[in-house]
Image (cartoon, helix red, strand yellow):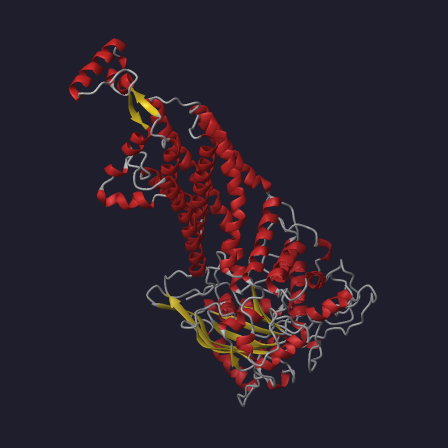
Amino acid sequence: MSGLGYPNMSQGEGFFPGDNNLPLFNHNNRMELQQYPRRSKPSLSPTLGELLKRVEDAQSDTSIDSTPVHHQALELGYACSSMPPSSPFVLSFNNLTYSVKVGQNMPFPVCGKEDLSHGSSETASMKVLLNDISGEAREGEIMAVLGASGSGKSTLIDALADRIAKESLKGSVTLNGEVLESRLLKVISAYVMQDDLLFPMLTVEETLMFSAEFRLPRSLSRSKKKARVQALIDQLGLRNAANTVIGDEGHRGVSGGERRRVSIGTDIVHDPILLFLDEPTSGLDSTSAFMVVKVLQRIARSGSIVIMSVHQPSYRILTVLDSLIFLSHGQTVYGGSPGGLPDFFGQFGHPIPENENRTEFALDLIRELEEAPDGTKTLVEFNKTWQTKKNPTNTTCNVSKLSLKDAISASISRGKLVSGAPNNSNLTSSVPTFANPLWAEMMVISKRSLLNAKRMPELFGIRLGAVLVTGIILATVFYHLDNSPRGAQERLGFFAFAMSTTYYTCAESIPAFLQERYIFMRETAYNAYRRSSYVLAHSLISIPSLIVLSIAFAATTFWAVGLDGGFSGFCFYFFAILSAFWAGSSFVTFLSGVVSHVMLGFTIVVAILAYFLLFSGFFISRDRVPSYWIWFHYISLVKYPYEAALQNEFHDPTKCFVRGVQMFDTTPLAAVPLSLKLNMLKSISSTLGMNITGNTCVVTGTDILRQQGITQISKWNCLWVTIAWGFFFRILFYFALLLGSKNKRR
């Protein structure tokens, strides 16, 4: 793994515990943090831009020397003497306070998980999740937020990452002394959720490459993007797993630690200045968790600020961390370096035993105090006193010598990519919201979706099989319908069932989007691409599959049932089926953007489609629908393709469906002899004053349309209305994503 600032590592070794530079594995060193010397400034690892140059020069230079990274413990914003004198980026947060109403559900659960404080009384109206939290984090360092479940770790990370509505969060968050605008923060930062939200059938390299296509500007050539991805793979220690699929429960893929590093890689491919992570080591074994944190250390050393929450770090992880914040019920009970823990708890009257894991001791003590009557009040007050002693003049050296504009410009000039932000004097206006234009985003989304579909052909195959089976059943049940009164009635039933079937088979769109829901939310949260790009791309790539399904269904049923119109009739019948598939797919896609649970989505779809069929005009004609329900008749999606198909079948005024004695076929008189039927026709003729014989045409196709109340809209207008419904629901889907995927708590 040459050229990454860590010697004696092959590409396949990653961060395997064999590196003699790590104090943990050097048997000559003592296993105590206080023995490590404090440096004045941590060395910086290469940025991704510098890594890219080294990848390009790899053919001519196979070994690049680099300076080993030295660890420096930092007092968390409380002692000026511990600050590197020329650190360009300083993220400061002061007096952060956030509370919610008791009993109110959190509006944005992060994939089913929320780190909430507990222990509030039932009578209280508000629950405080953060209570006057202050501190700062610096470039080149890792700040870890620790605490028991419910202490407010994730809430603090969300507050720093601008995932809490500004009107609800009190206090300030600044970068280099300047308040961060949400638009700028999204460009220069990344947020890694606790759950690994990845497409299971893409390989590691493909996953990172698609992320690069989204995050890196179009001005960067594809070869440069590939080289950048290769450098990132080496930086993450994923070389051996580069061509392995991510995998899921049904497909064997990468390990849990590798999956976590891939998840981190998708968010840092554009080399963000700020990196927030919600418990990146959760669910991993000790070695995998340590490897993940070592990756984060190298990211920090490359010129980033890394802030993460961690539940209970091991000793090895503690050696990598630069600063800690311990929380208890939303309050700070310790803020400082790992090396300051023994002194802090010693002065508090609870010295840490020599062979005890410091974080475990601290967390156990905090939990014991939480169960006491006074809680952690004494520890919170002691922390304030201790911090005052550490910084008696209460001076805050948290403002970097460089302004935010100059710091970002200097960072870009060093090779860090901030979504292609130009080196411009007017920073806030010059930083692009998105790295690529809309059409480029659509191409990447389409390519990724098609690749996923190609890797899982069984999904479309099952849907095509369902359509073919349904078509074959209908073709055999309604085989070669005649032009009798019963044949006309059976045609009505066939069209009603056929059109409603097209809608029901579209229900597969619900799990299709819900599987991508949280991936979409993660990617759009920090402007990987536009929501409109996602909607347009998925609308376009759905059309070829809908065309195949429509051809299969139309070809299976049209000639077998004996429908009218020849080839032109078949073409219109195909377009009616296609428009129904399009409207149904759009409707179900919209519902999937509103409903977040698969079973609930299926229940709603089945119920609403049943209502659409009821008011389509088959069971009860328009003229017979009660006036207070007539509105449902006009919004029924089944109505318009159903009426279009009927008009295509019964459009010929010369085609007869009821002749003479056939008018008795659907009445109790159908069983009487033919001679008696003819006599009745003569009586009817004399009464009406017209000649009605046994072969006289009584009911034509237009008469059937009139009986069904299909007189208002032509068949082509029905087709256009159905297509318009599809576009309407796609627009609603966009607004559902726009309003329903805001990654902020209120």
* Percent coordinates x, y for residue 507 in the rendering: 45, 42
* Percent coordinates x, y for residue 683 in the rendering: 18, 15
Farthest residue to the front: give it: 690
| Residue drawn 53% across the image and 72% down it | 185
Rendering quarter of residue 295: bottom right
Q: From the viewer's perspective, is residue 262 above or below residue 382?
A: above
209 sits left or right of 125 in the view: right
Q: From the viewer's perspective, is residue 194 above or below residue 686?
A: below
Q: Quadrant of the C terminus?
A: bottom left
* Percent coordinates x, y for residue 730 in the rendering: 44, 52
Farthest residue to the bottom: give it: 393
Choose between 300 and 625: the one closer to the eye: 625
Rendering quarter of residue 264: bottom right
Choose between 329 and 246: the one closer to the eye: 246
Q: Quadrant of the N terminus?
A: bottom right
* Percent coordinates x, y for residue 613 in the rendering: 35, 38
Q: Is residue 197 visible?
A: no
